[in-house]
Amino acid sequence: MKKFLIAPSILSADFARLGEDTQKVLDAGADVVHFDVMDNHYVPNLTMGPMFCKGLRDYGITAPIDVHLMVSPVDELVTAFAKAGANNISIHPDATTHLDRSIQLIKDQGCTAGIVLNPAVSLDCLDYIIDKVDLILIMSVNPGFGGQAFIPYILKKIAQTRKMINDSGRQIRLEVDGGVKIDNIAEIAKAGADMFVAGSAIFGHPDYKTVIDAMRQQLAT
Ligand code: DX5
Ligand code: ZN
């Protein structure tokens, strides 16, 4: 398992040239495509459905696609995204009535399963489901929009999550999403994260490779 993964959020990509821009960020050294799905119900914004995911596969994107579902309910879209080529699907516990069933559905569809916790959501909800998930995604902004600032109290939450993962004895990715930049990625890693979503920091720069290389350099320190 690669130690650190960089997952650009294509929410900040050029939507009119999504295939091309996604390939460009992968050629620049990204590990995973982070795919933000918003429904204007669970979050106040609207983005991409399963056909965009299939479109990326048809275009020739072969990298892992990490689907972050900010929708409610979740189950129908779990099935649709698995069919559309997703590798990981992450869901918010407060977006589904039967969390265990939805996590099981993701796995039954052949994907790895992630649970996403909004900034003010307690880690208590991991108590039982930690035995079933492959990934925990800690939101470091309130979901719905790219380009927001990292919430400082989340560093403590990342450290607490890292401890829970270590105590579980399971291989679980600890992903952080929101406001990740070159100048804070090292302290986010130091707190215990090993997968980093970055949207505006990467797509807002004219040369994606410069940003990704600088992030990796920070992670190596
Ligand atoms: C927010 C999304 C994030 C967002 C990150 O709801 O889940 O993935 O695109 O964007 P930045 O890196 O710009 O905060
Ligand atoms: Zn996201």
Image (cartoon, rainbow, N blue to C red):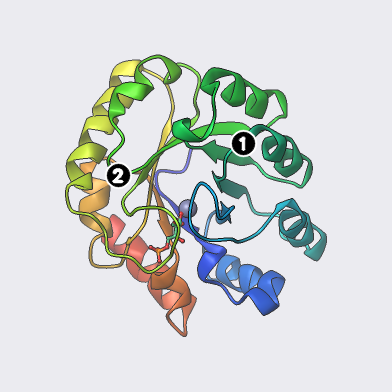
Q: What residue is rendered at 20% in x and 53% in y?
A: 187
Local SS, label 1:
loop
Residue 218 located left or right of residue 173: left
Q: Quadrant of residue 113?
A: top right
Local SS, label 2:
loop
Residue 21 located left or right of residue 177: right
Q: Nearer the viewer, residue 70 or 165?
A: 70
Q: What residue is rendered at 55% in x and 21% in y?
A: 98
Q: What residue is rendered at 32% in x and 62% in y?
A: 179
Q: Nearer the viewer, residue 130 or 169?
A: 130
Real-space CA distance between mark 2 and mark 1, rounded to the nearest whole angstrom: 20 Å
Against 104, is 15 above or below?
below
The 10 Å Cα crowd at callout 1, few under 14, some 14 to 19, many 20 or more, is some
Instruction: Say which residue label 2 marks.
Output: 119
Residue 107 located left or right of residue 56: left
The x, y position of residue 157, in whole percent, is 23, 38
Residue 221 seen by the camera: no
Q: Residue furthest front?
A: 41
The x, y position of residue 11, in whole percent, is 54, 65
Q: Quadrant of residue 75?
A: top right
Q: What residue is rendered at 61% in x and 61% in y?
A: 47
Against 148, is 120 above or below?
above
Instruction: Say which residue label 1 marks.
Output: 74
Q: Residue furthest right?
A: 58
Residue 16's disc is none
The x, y position of residue 96, in whole percent, is 54, 30
Residue 185 seen by the camera: yes
The x, y position of residue 133, in whole percent, is 49, 25
Q: Amino acid at mark 2?
A: Pro
Q: Nearer the viewer, residue 177 or 210?
A: 177
Q: Amino acid at mark 1?
A: Val
Q: Residue furthest bottom?
A: 206
